[in-house]
Amino acid sequence: MRLSWLPLAPLLTITILLLPVGAGLAGVLAPAFGWFPALGGTSLSLAPWRALFAWPGLSGAVWLSIATGLGATLVSLAITVMICAAWQGTRAFGLIERALAPLLSVPHAAAAFGLAFLIAPSGWISRALSPWATGWDQPPDLLITQDPNGLALMAGLVVKEVPFLLLMTLAALGQVPARRSVLLTQTMGYGRMAGWVLTVFPRLYPQIRLPVYAVLAYSCSVIDVALILGPTRPSTLAVQVLEWLSDPDLSLRFQAAAGALLQLALVMGLLLLWRAGEYAAARLGCTCVQMGHRMAQDSIMRAFSMVLALVAALAVGLGILGLAVWSVAGFWSFPNLLPDQFTWRNWARQSGGLSRIAIETAVIGVASVLISLALTIACLEAEYRHRLRQTNRVLWLLYLPLIVPQATFLIGLQTLAIGSGLTGMQGAVIAAHVVFVLPYVFLSLSDPWRAWDARQGLVAASLGAGQGRILWQVRLPMLLRPVLVAAAVGFAVSVGQYLPTLLIGMGRVTTLTTEAVALSSGGDRRLIGVYALSQTMMPLVVFALALALPALLFRNRRGVLDRG
Amino acid sequence: MLTKLTATAALLLGFCTPVLADSANPKDWDDVLEQARGQTVYWNAWGGDPRTNDYIAWAGEQVQAKFGVTLEHVKLSDTATAVSTVISEKAAGQTAGGSIDLIWINGANFAAMKENDLLFGPWAEDLPNWSLVDPQENPALVEDFTVPVEGLEAPWSMARVVFYYDSARVSEPPRTMLDFLDWTQANPGRFTYPQPPDFLGSTFLKQALLELVTDRTALYAPVTEANYEAVTTPLWEYIEALTPGLWREGKAYPQNGPAQRQLMADGEIDIAISFSPGEASAAIANFELPDTVRSMVLEGGTIGNASFLAIPFNANAKAGAMVVADYLMSVEAQLHKQDAAVMGTPTVLSMGKLTPEDAARFAALDLGIATLSPADLGPALPEPHPSWMERIAADWEARFGVAR
């Protein structure tokens, strides 16, 4: 009974996650019903809700949030499925994987800035075509970014969520005998894509369901991307809530709290709707199978999916390249394709602070990832050894921090942290990051972990290995790739955190992201370029390590990874 | 006032110790300097402008060398974040050792903090360098958007509404708000303003209101239900007429001043509003605007105000914060800031209170290619009461922001 604490791991993990979320929610629930003594709210009332519903932009903002949430998720999932269905198992798939995976590490805000610079009327595409093709010597007055339907916002989300879903799918694909299934359907005359969608996807989807839900919740409540690419008249509900929170008129905080709860309800409603959609899609799939169409002519669709993957990769890649050029730009007028002058001054000016902040970012990221990884593996191992299958349902609670919009509970969490005198310390920020990093680590790791062929453990046990030895010498090495991918995802999540760092760090703990967002409010693309590049590079290096290390370590034992 | 503040705070928080008991007394400056040595001052200030950030970093080196005070710039994307931090700390019962020592603040944020007893003081008028300013000559130093400052914040910078335009594309810029109407109709899509309730966008509305109302006196008292409609009707008629000729026909707006400046740099617009007379010159020097950009003001004057520094009631390093604020009001710091190559913002000091040598140093400053001289800036109009700004910004939101 050396590891008798192991069964408690899930409970410990859930407490670590739920305590802050619960406290934060309480901190928002009270003001939403008029209770906030520091601001003179000492009686319960529905006034905040009346004020919220009296806001003229409410229906527009709510519809926009719903549309972007559903739209971005549907399109991202569709593109991911198309790419996998069309190309999985081919050499081209490896290329797509290598092109898209690095995009995962690009922070949302950086990708959005890059995209905005590409597609704006004064952006790179327009510059490349002007004036020789378009005749424009000044930018056309066209509404492309900030369009009222949120299409630019959705595009900004999709280019970031496709790599995420693709990576999650890849991590899960190892557990489904995809190649054999597709081969079988092909011998029955099905097209490659139809065969994949009808036989692989139904088994794959349960493993990527939570990532999909996280994408849905995130897309519906995103703030930074919406600020950069989204419409402003009105903006999405989440952005509006944050605006109320930061309004000098302190009484708007009550309304903001009510709005934050409405945002929560919106996300819950969308998740239910999506769940219903899953049943509908399953029925549709069955009908398809019964009708027996083979859909063998899919070469156009396959080419189209390749184009989509390339467009997504290019949109982010060129956008980042654009930011890189901005970071060394002097004055850069329209319609010049390149800056009128180049200068290192933008970098030189920042270099002092940059290295110090980069180190702090890395320390926070590594610490929160290590804690998250340890808790995740302890939970999964407890589940496996003690057959705690019922915790599966409990562990759904892990995903609360991803589903409850950040702005909803972080304000309440800050009050809690101040009360305990923990704010402004690196440790407190790391703890706050764990709340957001852990779910992603768990999300990445749990399915590959559970799908591990337990017979490997039986073989090891029959050779005399104890539970601990099985874990360290069989399971972890075999699962090294998903473990490292989970760590890289977690690190990227930590680097990208803005609100938790700001609110719990009280501005005393700065990371590349808090610095970048503070600077981005100044709109200077040169500085945004400098910080967005630094912010992108850091997780990128970690991802490169995560992909390279297993291959390097097991270069003589490839079979270990293939069965992991 | 002080006793009232203390008593209220004590009552509210259930504490019996007076707020000032353990902290610096600005009347005893030597003691303040003594206490300040070795303190770390966390200055929460908007971090969106690299020039301001560089200036704050420079000031940090100076106060370290001169007074042994360490200055940490906490870069905010929105000043209200600092206000909510102080509120959260108060809600959590943290009445001392708070995380913010100094805030760059003015207008509505100051009014909100003052009203909620979140500020330390009075202290500003006890600073040694207060003797260099002249509130009678420059009333904006003691009235922040008509709200009496009462020594709760110290000025460190002056701001004035100016417009900057690209002289390569615009030969005759409009000189009145009504001119703007004609100009946008002749040049559709080439002008816009930051979207209210952004500070600068709301300022554009106030500037228009000041020109369009027949009687300005109502604007210098809190808004009332009785007068709001009548006073603002000309403004809404004007904005209604202006909107179709705006950039993107008013379907989208830049979110803040810097975003508007980027539109100017991208050639998407030809004229922009600014609250800093030195912005255009500094932006040219920083490669952010073409060197053909020039500044101008409206006939009849433009809005002017002061930027202030305040100390929260629970600040940890009050003495250090006062030393920093005093240094920022010094001749040396003000000269450095008004240098076009640094920030180019007008000084808070009164030339009549300086020694002739110091006054000459200000007169000798090169203001930059696109900066108007103090004489060309014309008369400064005081800020209306903050309640007007809040009401107009909310009304704009309903009329033009979201409901269409």
Image: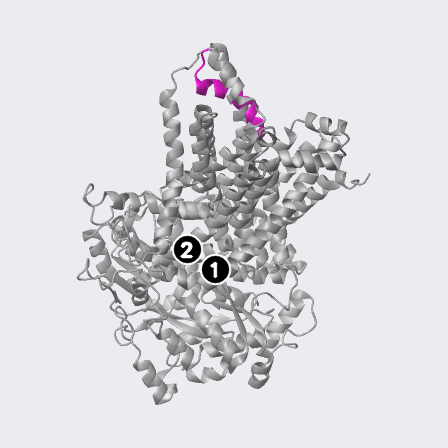
Q: Chain of mark 1?
A: A
User: Any magenta on residue A77?
Assistant: no
Measured in 3D between alpha carbons, the distance from the residue under mark 2 to the one under mark 1, in whole angstroms, is 9 Å
Residue A354 circle label = 1
Can you identify the residue that label 2 sits on? A530
* Residue B243 visible here: yes
Give how far across and how far down residue A202 sits, in percent: 54, 22
* Residue A146 visible here: no
Give how far across and how far down residue A318 sits, in percent: 36, 43
Q: Which quarter of the picture shows residue B200?
A: bottom left
Q: Magenta residues?
A: A189-207
The relative height of residue B192 versus residue A59 in the rendered view (above or below) is below
Residue at 78%, 40% (x, y): give it. Answer: A3
Residue at 24%, 63% (x, y): give it. Answer: B291
- Identify the secondary structure beneath mark 1: helix
User: Any magenta on residue A192?
Assistant: yes
Identity, as a three-letter code, of the amino acid under mark 2:
Val
Give how far across and how far down residue A433 sits, in percent: 59, 49
CB under 8 Å between discs 2 and 1: yes
Residue at 65%, 59% (x, y): give it. Answer: A422
